[in-house]
Image (cartoon, rainbow, N blue to C red):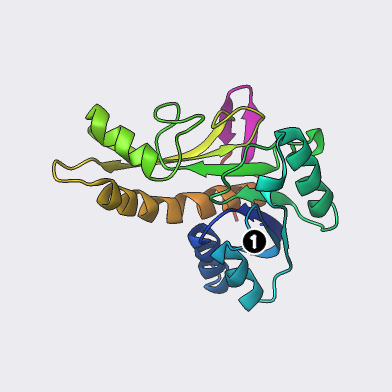
Amino acid sequence: MKHLKLAVLLSGGGTTLENFFTHIEAGKLDAEVAVVGSSRKDAFGLERARRRGVPTFVVESRRYRESARLSEAIFAELDRYEFDLLLLAGFMCFITLPAKLAGRAMNIHPALIPAFCGRGYYGHYVHEAVLHYGVKVSGCTVHFVDNVYDHGPIIVQKTVPVLDGDTPESLAARVFEQEGEAYPEAVRLFGEGRLRIEGRRVRVLEAPSE
């Protein structure tokens, strides 16, 4: 597996970022976080990064009316760093991915795409919608990023049952347990060179025999 340098974008508490730190420090993922960027200066995820000596930057989304301008500002910051893979980790802004990062950016969504996804479906709104609709299974999806909300080719999906007594909070907790395994798994497969994008599909190649 190639040692990966990761760039992470977030907007909030950074629990997904912390999960990556945990996997890296436990030797489960051959990677390092090279930089963490946030759309909010008060995001606790920035503090999680700083505690580990990881460089950070802030591009406040509220200062930009157009997503194109926000995207330009974010990628101008990211261009100052070397990284192999960009991870969206609770990043609550729509950005336009430059062509050079096609196939090198991932996102995780707390539902089974193409259900309960797209504009407006984030955080607790996803789990409220799942419960309101009455589906029996939910889960999480890791996908490559393109320039449409929650649309890029799917890499990994994991499922959880939706229980009769679930609240948005209890369902979110169960889904996040699976997110904590699915996202590092997708990154690991990328580092092993085992992901091949074929149109809408991501083919996972067999691991080379030792």
Residue at (53% x, 61% y) in the render: 14
Residue lying furthest top in this view? Answer: 199
Tell me the quarter of the image containing the C terminus: bottom right
Q: Is residue 83 magenta?
A: no
Residue at (79% x, 53% y) in the render: 78
Residue 199, x across and y down, in percent: 63, 22
Q: Nearer the viewer, residue 50 or 112?
A: 50
Q: Is residue 200 magenta?
A: yes
Residue 123, x across and y down, in percent: 42, 45
Q: Secondary structure at mark 1?
A: loop
Residue 173, x across and y down, in percent: 32, 54
Q: Nearer the viewer, residue 16 or 120?
A: 120
Residue underneath mark 1: 41
Residue at (29% x, 51% y) in the render: 169
Residue 136, x across and y down, in percent: 22, 33
Answer with left or right where residue 96 lies relative to residue 13: right
Residue lying furthest left in this view? Answer: 164
**Is residue 2 in view?**
no
Identity, as a three-letter code, of the amino acid under mark 1: Lys
From what the image shows, is residue 103 above or below residue 199?
A: below
Answer with left or right where residue 139 lies relative to residue 72: left
Answer with left or right where residue 77 lies relative to residue 37: right
Q: Nearer the viewer, residue 149 or 197?
A: 149
Q: What range is drawn magenta here?
A: 195-204
> Does the magenta stretch mainly form a helix, a strand or a loop?
strand
Residue 70 picture quarter? top right
